Image: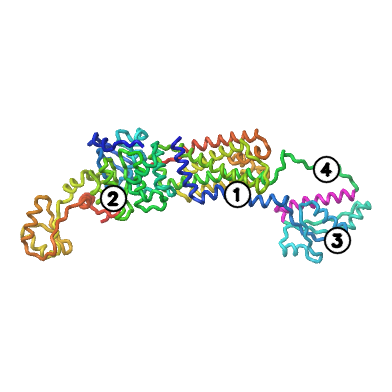
Amino acid sequence: MKRILADVSAFGRQYLRSRVGTFFALAFPVILILLFGAIFSSSGTPRVPLAVQDLDSTPASRGFVQALNNTTLITYQAIPTNANFQDYMRAHSINVALEIPAGFQATLIQAEMGNASAKVNVTLAGDRTQSSFGIVYSAVAAVATAFNLKVANATEVVSVDESQFTVRQFGYIDFFLPGIIGFTVLTTPMFGMTSICAEYRTRRFFKLLATTKLSKAEWLAAKVVFYVLLLFVSVAIMMLVGVVVFGMQATLTPLAVLLIIAGTFEFTSLGMVLGIFVRDPGTGEALANAIGFPMMFLAGSFFPIDAMPPFLRTLARGLPLTYINEGLRATMVFGNDGTALTYLLITLGFAVVFFVVGARGLSWKSK
Amino acid sequence: MAPRDVRAAREAGVGEHVIEVRGLVKRYPDITAVDGIDFNVNRGEVFSLLGPNGAGKTTTVEILEGLRDPTAGEARVLGEDVRSGYRRIRERVGVLPQDFEPFDRLRPREAVAYWAHLFDHAVSEADVANIIETVGLADRASTFALNLSGGEKRRLGIAMALVGQPELLFLDEPTTGLDPGARRELWTLIGDLKRKGRTILLTTHYLDEAEQLADDVAILNHGKIVAHGSPPALISQFGGGTTIVLAGAGREGYEALPSRGIAAELHGVDVLVHVPMASQVRPMLAKLASIEMPLTEIYTKRSTLEDVFLKLVGARMEEGVLAA
């Protein structure tokens, strides 16, 4: 135990004296929180700009545009009636635009008077692959349906009512912060350990350590202890920023703390496993990036896994970070400790496997 | 720290083999790095493995340090087989590896304390200060290792190797890459350690270093020991005795000698006369003084390990590389 503590102390001093490591462990996650928090928390649901050319210019067409505006999904911008619709879109780099044809109001009146063949098409132009197009399409379709119901003099039978399904009033930051904690639990120890293994090999520190009584398992355990302490500080700062700057409601539960410890154990060990294959700092960096970057995006650190295509969702279930992100959200946001406990056990399973493989596979000696 | 009395141990075991190597072989798919070598290192002596780069010095030392497994043969350190018993002797051995680099962002006093803890030695600040003082780094004890000079870094490495008052020190090319001043300073430090009774296995490709510091030298080339003995014994056996230099004698002096029955060699404007036995030097000097020839100076030059190496290996060694 004394050897482990001595290594924690010596490694910690070196780590904290290297400003790059400290920046990425403590300051970088806070920058991400401030950046994403400011983008998504302060203005509520973002509105999509929609350019509209109203060729009818009647009370009915203006009412259609007003109804679109009332959806709170779009911000309205007018296209002059004398402009060519498509040329104007190109000239002004407009993503989505709506054209209301002349005769819009007259057609509605004919329909109200019982003319069954009366029909009018509004045209939505834009890039279908953009998510903004889908949002606008939904808004336009909903408004068109409402107009149709009104013309048919029908009553609304099914309506949607909103209800808060979590105990407290959560905001974007409450869902985002557990992902950033997971991201930090992945990047700080794993990238750090891969780089350390590369440096220790090229500078022959492993050989030097092999002449002492410190075992590889003790050395790895010391790194786990140090990174757990470092991540406690990092998470405390993140929570403080979340609460003070964004009024975050999510709390750090005991299960969340255990998940952070288990995750740090897991990714420190995974870093040592990658260290088995690393021969120099260049390959270390490339290997950590190749493993770390896809994982941080696929495991739901920044985007919900449910929004991904089915095959990516299946892939995400095989990634160790998924269980930390989802487990943290389960316990910190939804209060679902049963799921969090299951994910904690899965994380510990990964951690033990990585620890054993890392401690046995990494050689300090020469062949 | 509870220091063992190294001097007492030495006195108790003078002549005892601290290292025993028999038929040691280390073979790789493309090369045999160590090819069946035998040697012993006695307690309290400085034993030097001398040879050019690639001769097998570091491979041999790393086998003895427990860092490589031999292909064949036997190697015992402090009575333990290096393959099976190294854990039992780890704290009795100090190691300065080849191209030692310290941890950049630790100060020497922190590095020494850290290293002591890795051997389970409880060290006080006074113990650490004492070790730092021993290697002459007292005024640099609080400087980040990153900012130490090359020589100071090696001194720090030796300080770390000394934390457990080890009975045996492995110093693998401790002065390679250092400037002459730093090399001399390290020689003084190694000499001090020797006087304090430490057994030292020193590898080097500097012939003068081995001659200055070692009690016993094994010259390695292509994985084999080509000569083994004390520097004076090697010089006496292979060095060709003493050379009398007739500075400025030129061709005239050179041509005057054969008629007096003296074999000589013209080397630029100097004439060299080799005298194999020390007892023959004085009569030869008297004989030469009686011959008329142009001279600026007469002096004698003792053979060195460099002459021994040249004779045995057939090439000179410059910075660890064999030169034609």
Q: Residue at x 5, y 61 (%)?
A: B290
* Element under disc 3: loop
* Element under disc 4: loop
What is the three-letter code of the residue carrying label 3? Asp
Per the image, the residue denoted by label 1 is A30
What is the three-letter code of the residue carrying label 4? Ser
Q: Residue at x 49, y 45 (%)?
A: A194
The answer to whether dots 4 and 2 both sit on one chain is no
Task: Tell me the subunit letter for badge 2.
Answer: B
Task: Tell me the subunit letter for badge 1.
Answer: A
Per the image, the residue denoted by label 3 is A56
Classify B251 as above or below A113. below
What is the three-letter code of the residue carrying label 2? His
Q: Is residue A343 left or right of residue A105?
A: left
- Magenta run includes residue A143: yes
Alpha carbon distance from label 1 to label 3:
51 Å
The answer to whether dots 1 and 2 both sit on one chain is no
**How far across and how far down the image is residue A23, in percent?**
54, 50
Q: Residues within 10 Å of mark 2 (few under 14, many from 20)?
A: many
* Element under disc 1: helix
Per the image, the residue denoted by label 4 is A159
Question: Are discs 1 and 2 less than 8 Å apart at CB?
Answer: no
Alpha carbon distance from label 1 to label 2:
54 Å
- Magenta run includes residue A109: no
Task: Single out the mark in the foreground, 3 or 2.
Answer: 2
Per the image, the residue denoted by label 2 is B205
First to last magenta residue range:
A127-152
**How far across and how far down the image is residue B265, in percent?**
14, 59
Please name whichever residue, B299 or B40, is drawn nearer the observer in this view of the structure.
B299
